[in-house]
Image: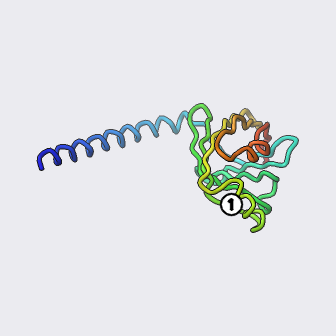
Amino acid sequence: MKQSMTLSCGVVLACSVVFLAGLSASADDKKDKPALSGTWALKGGEAKIEFADKNVVKFAPHGDSKVIAVICEYTVDKEGLVKAKVTDFEGKDEAKEKVKDLLPIGTEFTFKWKVKDDAAKLENLKGEKVEALKTHLEGEYSEKK
C-alpha cells in the first residue's frame, strides 16, 4: 500500500511539473510562433487555404470550398512547421465521398509555411496518403483581401 501511495504521489508530482512547464512554455511560444491567419490563393493554380478559426485550416484544392474543402486541426512551431490532422470535409456529397477514400479523416501530415509580407510559401508537405494533396497545394501563395 505504501509503495502504491508513493508511486501515485510521484505520478501527480511529475504531471504537475509537466503542466507548469507547459504553461510557461506556451506563454513564450505565443510570442515566437508565426501567426497563421487569412485566406491565401495559390499563384498560377486553383488552391485556396483559409486559416479559419484558431487552430483550424481549410484547404480547397480546386479553389471553391463549395465543391470540396478539407478541414484540419493544426499546430505550428517556431520555425513554421505545421502539423495538421484531417477532421472533416465540406462541399458536395459526391466530392466528399471521393476525398474520404483518398484522404481519410484522421490523416496526419506536416508542411512548412513561410509568410513574407503578402506572399507565402507552402513546401515540404509530408505524410501518408497525401500525394494528391501535395500536388495541389505546394507552391507560392498570395493573400486574398
Q: Residue at x 62, y 50 (%)?
A: 107
**Occupied quadrant, residue 141:** top right
> Would you call the spot at circle 1 few (<14 residues within 10 Å), some (14-19), or many (20 or more)?
many
Question: Extreme left residue here?
Answer: 2
Residue 57 image position (x, y, % from top left): 66, 51
> Considering the numbered disc 1 on the image, is that residue within a helix, a strand or a loop?
strand
Up/down of 101 relative to 122, above or below: below
Query: Foreground: 9 or 36?
Result: 9
Q: Residue at x 71, y 54 (%)?
A: 102
Q: Residue at x 17, y 48 (%)?
A: 4
Query: Foreground: 117 or 46?
Result: 46
Q: Residue at x 66, y 39 (%)?
A: 126
Residue 14 image position (x, y, % from top left): 29, 40
Residue 47 image position (x, y, % from top left): 80, 48
Tag 1 residue: 89
Question: Extreme bottom residue here?
Answer: 93
Q: Which scheme is used to colour this image of the protein?
A: rainbow
Question: Extreme right residue here?
Answer: 44
Q: Is residue 4 left or right of residue 139?
A: left
Up/down of 13 relative to 94, above or below: above
Residue 27 image position (x, y, % from top left): 46, 39
Query: Foreground: 78 or 9?
Result: 9
Up/down of 129 relative to 66, above or below: above
Q: Is residue 67 left or right of residue 55?
A: right
Q: Is residue 118 left or right of residue 107?
A: right
Q: How many numbered marks are there? A: 1
Residue type, mark 1 in image: Phe
